[in-house]
Amino acid sequence: MIHNYEKQVYTAVLGKVIGVYLGRPFEGWTKQRIQEKWGAITRYVHEDCNKPLIVTDDDISGTLTFIRALADSGLYEKTPDDFFGKTWLNYLIPDKTILWWGHMCHSTEHTAYIRLKQGYQSPESGSMKLNGKEVSEQIGAQIFIDAFGMVAPGQPELAVELAGKAARVSHDGEAVYAAQVVAAMVSIAFVEKDIHRILDQAVAFIPPDSVIAQVHRDVRNWAEQYPDWNDTYDKISEKYGYVPFSGNCHVVPNHAIMVMAWAYGNNDFYKSLSIINTAGWDTDCNSANVGSVCALCAGLEHLCDTYDFRSPVADRLVIPTADGTYSVSDVLEQALYVAKIGRHVMGMPEIPAPKNGAKYHFEMPGSLHGFLPVTEKTCAVNTNAPEGFNGEYCLEFRFENAKDSPCRIETPLVTTETGGGYAAPYTPSVYSGNTFHMKGRLNGNNTSLKMYLLKTDGGRIYSDPAAAGVDGIFDLRWTPEFMGNVIALGLEATSADSQPEKAFIDFIRITGVSKLIFDNGDTDFSPWLYSMTEKRIAPFTNDPVPGMRYFLHNEEAGVAVTGNRSWGDTRISVQFKIHSADRAGILLHYQGLKRWIGVIFSRQDLRIIRNLYGEETLAQTNFIYQENRVMQLDICSCGSRIDVSIDGKNVLSASDDQLKSGGAGMYLDYGCAGFGRFAIEADITEF
């Protein structure tokens, strides 16, 4: 049994995320340029570079997406090699999600994606034989790999096996060995906290005659010989730098300076991150890998001994994939997801979700679920829960001068931050009809506390004030109804006096029904995540329904979807029109490009299709659609039954027990289709 398993996974994910945010602003800079500007990297420098701190980044999104292969297959540690490639095809939208889309034979990952689309399966998709030695040995496999160590804690052999399967989707040779060493180090660090012993053990899992193994021997010898890491860096640059190991971003130089940072850091999280970031090159990737291992060595309580890495971040994450479920997330949510996979892999018993499945539960020291202050003299901190709360920890909302103006904290529900080079498509976390249930305690008889939703225009939708009872305990339920999109969930406090006061938040749970209505003429597509070639707002001449919106797609499998895997039973009502298309229809229980239930029209028939990495017809009837005819299409999926009606007449039914949750939207193959009024209602369920 692994001691404090969930806490250690949280620590490792947090260490990786801190590393990314620390190194991202100056990615690709040389050591000389960094030292000339800052001397050494000892803090977040994003403001110096006029960049945001919280960004989309492939190191984070790839790590926390590709690990889903183990759960999505249902086979966990026995997931076959080819399924890791199928996972890429499920979650990747070209030019939009996860990867750096740098084109064929320039971006190794983009090259592998093209190979997968061509029909090659993993591991051939990333093979040296297919893509060449230089392309296949760039850095990408290493940067995506940490989570495969997290799901095999104290079992480095298994971590290495899983890491090899995941890495070979896109890479080969030394890139795979580097990834396997990192995964082994993460795995070992759950049970061994001395970085030098971790390095000794991890490198033994790769061939001793590999370049990566020689890198470890040389760098650690130089570290013993030279007290100053700058001298070792010079040796690395000469023997293992970008001149002898070329390409867009070769793994060998970057792995070498990671070994340097570990060797000189001596279990010190702050020192190790300072070294690896000051050394330059692929700073966000290298800092992320160093951070995950060193965080496990240092322990959660010691990550901020020298510098406060945590407060500015508040655990915020952006994970853009073709499934919008985790578009906007946080470190604790993702860590618990990874740990849940790890418990399956290791055969450990499952544990209940914190606070009965509350989305915001704060049940880890320092966790904030993204809540940050947006007004002066306001603070959000994680603290020990008062007596009578549902767990060990809670959110403490501190404020003063709330008499003069309201004090607020917020957590994001959507994002537009991309960080440069990475898109951030999303579906919202919150929809009209959701019920927010917040419990907590007010300290101060004169305090008023409300929840609110921040709209895109800056306006707010407010709950009633929390009604405090005995000892200030409150239990607030709120079901807002609204049109359009909301971008943040906030708490607002006001007071009858100006003294410092506080509120303690036990949890915020989201239940109820998600409702989304697009009336004819609406042009706001912000709640949609789409892979269509183009959106068309302008109507066709003589449209029978004013305000029809159209999507156009030049190949197979275009989607425009909203919602997430918390959506269970779903009811859809849509005015649907096919201008001309090979296939078009409506999706429900959508979990990615290769995981959905579809009500799909072809030129000859109508089918209910289940796609689980391959389409299977659940029901079929003859139906020839008429071009430009507007149909009233109604779909109800309740339990395992799916019913389809056209213009009020039931035309098709089917049953499915495999895909029972997920988003909804539109599907299109080679053509153009549109909709007028589109209404969705989905019951929220756990997933």
Image (cartoon, rainbow, N blue to C red):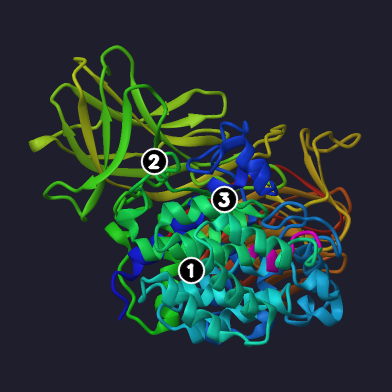
- Who comes first in sequence, dot 1 or dot 3? 3
- The residue that appears at 57% across and 63% down in the rendered structure is 258
Label 3 crowd bin: few (<14), some (14–19), many (20+), radius 10 Å: many
Distance Cα–Cα, label 2 vs label 1:
43 Å
Nearest-to-viewer mark from 2 and 3: 3
Q: Amino acid at mark 3?
A: Asn
Distance Cα–Cα, label 1 vs label 3:
52 Å
x then y, percent, for residue 475: 22, 41
x then y, percent, for residue 120: 81, 79
What range is drawn magenta here?
247-254
Q: Secondary structure at mark 3?
A: helix
Please check the rendered image and state whether residue 249 is part of the magenta-colored stretch, yes or no: yes
x then y, percent, for residue 556: 83, 63
- Which residue position is annotated with label 2? 311
- Determine contact: label 2, label 1, CB under 8 Å: no
- Which residue position is annotated with label 3? 277
In which quadrant of the rendered image does the C terminus lie?
bottom left
- Which residue position is annotated with label 1? 639
Rendered view: 16 above or below 476: below
- The residue that appears at 57% across and 68% down in the rendered structure is 222
- Who comes first in sequence, dot 2 or dot 3? 3
